[in-house]
Amino acid sequence: MYKQTKKKINFFRNKKDVNFIVWICPLLKPLLLIEETSIYKEEEKVKQIYFLEQGKAAYILPRYNSLPYCYIEEGEAFGIVDIVFRTLHSPDEAIAPERLRRKFSVMATEKSVMLSLDFDDLQRMQIEYPEFYDELFDS
């Protein structure tokens, strides 16, 4: 049922734990974006992370006419670095979603399909599947 997700997204590619796949795949929300559509902007609240299934996206410099400086390729996860940044600077604090803000802006640079995972589901993943949560943040 979830073969395409396992095949296209690097994070899911070698997962043998069927329970994890069956748990997480229904939580992933598909998004279809056209070229030059903003995915998120610097200083926005962190509401989800993303997996690029098809197309291309990039971290951009809004002050320089949305100049792309780092491309996100098919299969990659993104939107995670904002959470990592916060935990590195406040390692003893619980991650409170209302305090998490984006440090970067990201835009689809061509027609793209991605999957989003809500922050609340990510926190549940940390409790229910800590080994996969850690792996997501180690990559």
Image (tube, rainbow, N blue to C red):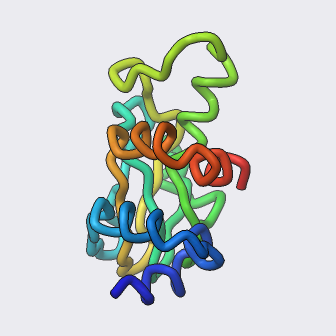
Give the quarter of the figure containing the C terminus.
bottom right
The quarter holding residue 117 reads: bottom left
Where 128 falls versus 136 (above or below)?
above
Find residue 40 and report its horizontal and vertical position in percent.
Answer: 37, 48
At a point 33% along the width and 87% down the height, the residue shown is 1
Left or right: residue 111 compared with residue 8: left
The quarter holding residue 111 reads: bottom left
At a point 54% along the width and 55% down the height, the residue shown is 78
Find residue 135 and report its horizontal and vertical position in percent.
Answer: 67, 53
In the depicted view, which residue is nearer to us: 134 or 22?
A: 22
Left or right: residue 113 compared with residue 132: left
Tag count = 0
The quarter holding residue 85 reads: top right
At a point 37% along the width and 70% down the height, the residue shown is 22
- Farthest residue, direction right: 138
Where 49 falls versus 85 (above or below)?
below
Find residue 12 and report its horizontal and vertical position in percent.
Answer: 55, 72
At a point 38% along the width and 62% down the height, the residue shown is 24
In the depicted view, which residue is nearer to us: 118 or 69?
A: 118
Left or right: residue 84 compared with residue 100: right
Left or right: residue 43 compared with residue 75: left
In the depicted view, which residue is nearer to us: 38 or 90?
A: 90
Find residue 38 and report its horizontal and vertical position in percent.
Answer: 34, 56
Where 102 falls versus 130 (above or below)?
above
In the depicted view, which residue is nearer to us: 100 or 26?
A: 26
